[in-house]
Amino acid sequence: MSADILVDVNHLVKTYGPLRAVDDLSFQVKRGEIVGLLGPNGAGKSTTMKVLTCYLVADGGTASVAGVSIDVDPVEVRRHIGYLPENAPLYTEMRVKEYLEFAGRLRGMPAARRRERIDWAVKACGLEAKYMSPIGALSRGYRQRVGLAQAVLHDPDLLILDEPTSGLDPIQLIEIRKLIMEIGKTKTVFFSTHIMQEVEAVCNRALIINRGRLAADGSPSELKTKLGVNNLENAFLKATGHEALTA
């Protein structure tokens, strides 16, 4: 496998009883890419991310992150990943400072390294003004920033973000998009979204999955060209078996 391939997924399968949430899915993500994962509700986006982060065990196929198999050494895989689920599991009674220190200790980071990385994450995520605030008193936008700060705290190779802008107001949404783009300058980012404009604005590549299978792969402009449409919304509709909207 090439050294610039960070995520390698081959024929991945995950079932829930009779339902195949992920069905023979294969793709690769290169270092330095910002990749958007698109798909209808129930397409398998969150399940794919949970398998890659080793929260779920696959029923078939293989996957690796930074050359480490999710089956062979899931603990080592997690060291390479920063993960922000759709509903960030924050301790709302803690202050931002306390929560990030707690997250650093859970990661086994030495005290000096922990302080250095907390300082970096707080600055990178724009949390200086909220550093001593209780998380429970923060807006949803700032809670997402706290979630992102813990995800980048241990300096991972890969950030996996599940619907990172879900439920945000327009200003918060723009701010988090800018933050993802800024973090993407030094990290590989793989995130799911329902918002086409987000993919156009943030991603240099998009994967469209439908019923657990890969339906399309390419940059936003490549997808429009391949599918013969003039916008990403129509590309998404065609890739998932729906009729494109008229202009």
Image (cartoon, grey):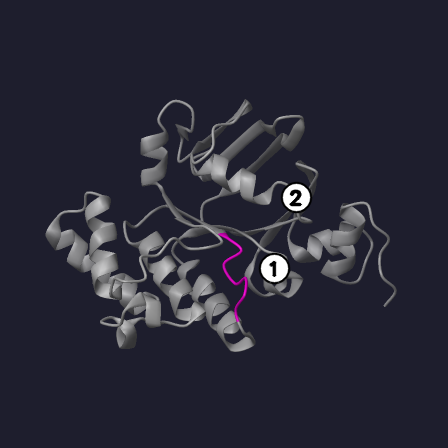
Residue visible at 16% across and 58% down? 115
Task: Determine which residue is flagged by label 2.
Answer: 42
Answer whether labels 2 and 1 touch (C-beta < 8 Å). Answer: no
On screen, residue 19 above or below 99? above
Whole-percent x, y for residue 56 in the image: 47, 33
Q: Is residue 78 shown left or right of residue 198? A: left
Residue at 49%, 59% (x, y): give it.
164
What stretch of residues is rendered in magenta?
Answer: 162-168
Q: Which amino acid type is shown beneath numbered disc 2? A: Gly
Q: Nearer the viewer, residue 149 or 17?
A: 17
- The reply to whether residue 3 is visible in this rendering is yes
Which comes sooner in the sequence, label 2 or label 1? 2
State the CA–CA distance, disc 2 to disc 1.
Answer: 19 Å
Q: Is residue 90 above or below residue 169?
A: above
Residue 225 visible in the snapshot: no
* 9 lies above or below 46: above
Neighbour tally class for label 1: few under 14, some 14-19, many 20 plus, Cα within 10 Å: many
> Measured from the top left, where is residue 9 in percent x and y?
54, 32
Classify mark 2: helix, strand or loop: loop
Where is residue 64 drawn, in percent x and y?
A: 45, 31
Residue 116, given in percent of the width and then of the height, sits at 18, 59
Q: Quadrant of residue 22?
A: top right
Observer-nearest of 119 and 28 = 119
- How many neighbours does mark 2 have within 10 angstroms: few (below 14), some (14-19), or many (20 or more)? some
User: Helix, strand or loop at disc 1?
Assistant: helix
The residue depicted at 63 percent of the width and 61 percent of the height is 195
Which SS type dominates the magenta stretch? loop
Quadrant in the picture for the C terminus = bottom right
**Between tags 2 and 1, which lies in front?**
2
The numbered mark at residue 199 is 1
* Residue at 43%, 36% in the rendered image: 55
Q: Is residue 246 left or right of residue 236?
A: right
